[in-house]
Image: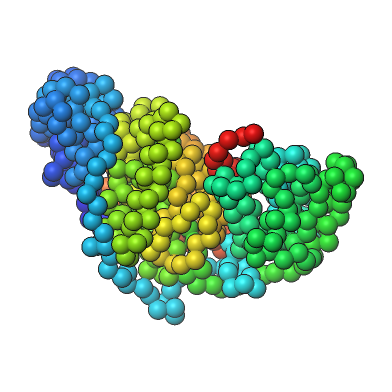
Amino acid sequence: MSNSDTPISWVKPGSSEFDLVTLSDEDNVAVAIRNLAKAESLQEVTTLDEIPKGHKVALQNITSGSAIIKYAQIIGYAKSDISAGQHIHTHNIEFRNTEHQYVFSIDNAEPELLALSDQATFKGYKRDNGKVGTRNYIAVLASVNCSATAVQHIANAFDQNILADYPNIDGVVGFSHSTGCGLADSGDGYDNLQRVIWGFAQHPNVAGVLIVGLGCEVNQISSLISQSELTRGPLLRTMNIQSVGGHTKTVAAGVARIKEMLPEVNNVQRETCPASALMLALQCGGSDAWSGITANPALGYASDLLVKNGGTAVLAETPEVYGAEHLLTRRATNEAIGKKLIDRIEWWENYVEINGGSMDNNPSPGNKLGGLTTILEKSLGAVAKGGTTRLNGVFRYAEPVDRNGFVFMDTPGYDPASITGEVAGGCNLVAFTTGRGSTYGCKPSPSIKIATNTEMYERMKDDMDINAGTIVTQGASIAQVGQEIFELLLEIASGKQSLSEQHGLGDHEFIPWQIGATM
């Protein structure tokens, strides 16, 4: 791809308009900037088909079975002979499982870090354990789906009229879910759920916690407490519906316990903190052909800036780095970290196979309408969110992220489940790129939305915090938009509301990743 400090290099027609974009001299396809009619004569090719905006056109003849190249990487193979000027899409490109010969730790130079005195700063909430929050919430957590309604009724009792007397509290949020019983008391599914609840209970954006269970569930609160660093106290309370005496009594008792927390949680004040205290969840959803050209590289530039300032950027969505993982192993700090990533890739191949699926089940129908074809193409664009610095760690789902820099977390590609894991791991900010459009919000960590294209940005302006489509429509550089993202993240971390927060989104996006049988 092009250097981050210059606009993208275009394939130009004879007129002053741009019609196609190529991302590498090695590519044998280009992406249409606009809808192209059949028989249009462009600088490098004459179209043989109508080419929808965002879709690919062959720049040369490609024989059946030959590789189709974009980003200087293989995104699939020709199903049949393809002539220069033809539309390339799902009808004539096929997916094959990756068979990379992995190379480890050859692009892993230590990133240049700013001295603490030179780091960017934001206004955050300092916690006793040394972490820093960007928000100040009270969380009501369900240990099991059987307590989900009680959790929501407790949280809903605290409306803006009540919280008006506590201006330093961002809200009381109920985190309910659909599991917690009917599952094995060991294994991936159980471990995922426990790590998620631990992570939210200890999250830097959460100052007070109430955990509510039924009492007879597999996911016992006593086990949650004993197997974590959680300690009951005034700001961490627990209860079971069966012990308290039913739903109504539980809601009343829960409301009373939250009211006791309000004054102490409200006493905390924002203070100046270094950007090294920020941990950013990187996410893309509703991707299109522009995701890997505009928004994701710009977010990658912002990720590099955060790492340079001592912070942490967390890439996730393992099924959406599939086919691009070989680019990450090159950046691994050491071979052990690189191999840990490959272990997760191989786990996913087996997981999908035993469930009768294919790694190419992703991209979604919406992704394909936007111009994407195979998971290889989608992944090569998705990994751009992770910038260019070395890979310092690979973490299991919802595992606490214990180091700074660029890291990876194993999660599904399904956005709410993925971000739930990243937030449980400690992310106190979320950056979400989207091409088709998403209205996702996240509590307790604020989420910004970055549009990949100007057309969608204008259509969904109420939900998009940044328009990375200017890289195409106005010739902005990746660095310019990346700097804009970084500066907005600092403002959001300091208390400015993202658009999703202004709309009240984020109460129902708590989705722990469920693995295994429901019994």
Q: Quadrant of the C terminus?
A: top right
Q: In this view, does 330 lie to the left or right of 128?
A: left
Looking at the picture, tell me which residue is in the foreground, 99 or 163. Answer: 99
> Residue 60: percent from the left, percent from the top?
10, 31
**What residue is drawn where x is 36% and y is 60%?**
337
**What residue is drawn where x is 55% and y is 38%?**
516
Which quadrant holds residue 359? top left
Q: Is residue 513 left or right of residue 315?
A: right
> Residue 226: percent from the left, percent from the top?
69, 61
Relative vertical location of residue 513 with respect to residue 429 in this rendering, above or below: above
Looking at the picture, tell me which residue is in the foreground, 221 or 281. Answer: 221
Relative vertical location of residue 216 with respect to residue 494 in this rendering, above or below: above
Looking at the picture, tell me which residue is in the foreground, 461 or 495. Answer: 495
Q: Is residue 215 left or right of residue 13?
A: right
**What residue is drawn where x is 63% and y is 40%?**
183
> Residue 497: percent from the left, percent from the top?
58, 53
Relative vertical location of residue 14 with respect to residue 487 in this rendering, above or below: above
**What residue is drawn where x is 18% and y is 27%?**
78
Which quadrant holds residue 14? top left
Q: What sort of colour scheme is used for the picture?
A: rainbow
